[in-house]
Amino acid sequence: MWSRCLWTLLPLFVPVHGVFKKLYCSLSESCECDFKPDIRGLEWDLYKNVFGQHLAQEAVSQEVSTFLQTKSPDRPLVLSLHGASGTGKTLVSSMLGSHLYGSGMNSPFVHQFIPTLHFPQAQHVDKYRRALKDWVQGNLTECARSVFLFDEMEKMPPGLIDVLEPFLGPFHVVYSTNYRKAIYVFISTVGEEVISKAVLAARRSDRDRDEIRLNELQEAIAHEAFNSTDSGFSGSRVVSQGLVTVFVPFLPLTRAHVERCVRAQLCQRGHCGRSDVVQAVGGALSYSPKHGQYFSTTGCKAVPAKIDLHL
């Protein structure tokens, strides 16, 4: 009670606002105290540690920056990350949490959902819908700046995610809660074939992959997410009503990109100079398509295990 009263008095003490906020935060676990967005840090992290993903780097940094700089957004930020396994989707979602809250991904205001863990049985989808709605509503009431991460959307029971529709649209108040400052991130492998075909076509026409633009893939990914029977967005109003801010494609990685992953992880282990390991790991991975072998079939996902074998 004391902390709430103190917070309401803060505007009366503008010259010492920082002092009073510090005192308030020492007495409270408010998300406003833990919410410490570092946009430049996020941009640098994306640039330095995400390889071969110019579209994701540009889209995520731009959308997050614009959203956080908007004092009163008219709707929450909804990012849907698509691409093959090992291309950096989970890494980027973790960076987002890490650069928004002082306690990073351990913040109680960052909520992660994994279908096989939280929604394992499709026959219980009605129960899951009620539980998810209550969880999101309750946490938005607690913290308007909540972040919700939904991994493995290709394994999400169909129809479940539509329970979020009222929270995602351009409405002013839902269930008496201001929900428009929240961020939702959906992660999926659905659309990887569409993305790979686009990159392969660019390669065959001697077009650099960095010349591929976001608008070339948006509609195709949205169409695949909506129509695929293996998609948590299958037939979803979240897609048909245009409630996703941006569909972010993660491109397949070449051997050069994978070797950058190897170098980065070797440096983290104190072995920056081991070019022999870089070459060995790069050569030990599988590549596709059969004729050409341009793209790593596992992205950077298998890199840590391969490094262990060659150190």
Image (spheres, rainbow, N blue to C red):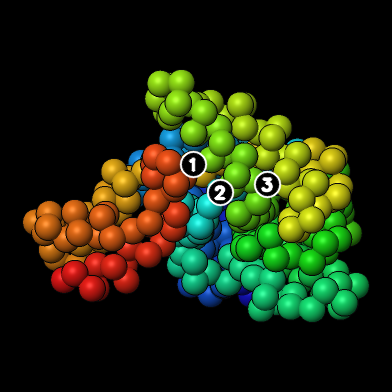
Looking at the rendered structure, the kind of residue marked 2 is: Gly
Residue assigned mark 2:
83
Left/right of residue 190 with respect to residue 105 in the rendered view: right
Mark before the other along the chain sequence, 1 or 3: 3
Q: CA distance from mark 2 to mark 1?
A: 6 Å
Mark before the other along the chain sequence, 2 or 1: 2
Q: CA distance from mark 1 to mark 3?
A: 20 Å
Mark before the other along the chain sequence, 2 or 3: 3
Q: CA distance from mark 2 to mark 3?
A: 17 Å
Residue assigned mark 1:
251
One can see residue 231 in this view: yes
Q: Quadrant of residue 155?
A: bottom right
Residue plotted at (26% across, 55% down): 283
Which dot marks residue 110? none
Marks 2/1 in contact by CB < 8 Å: the verdict is yes
The correct choice, above or below, for 104 with respect to 1 in the image is: above
Q: How many marks?
A: 3
Which dot marks residue 78? 3
Looking at the rendered structure, the kind of residue marked 3 is: Val
Disc 3 on helix, strand or loop? Answer: strand
Left/right of residue 272 with respect to residue 262 in the rendered view: left
Residue plotted at (26% across, 50% down): 259
Q: Nearer the viewer, residue 157 or 100?
A: 157
Looking at the rendered structure, the kind of residue marked 1 is: Leu
Q: In this rendering, which labeled residue sits more in front, label 1 or label 3?
A: 1
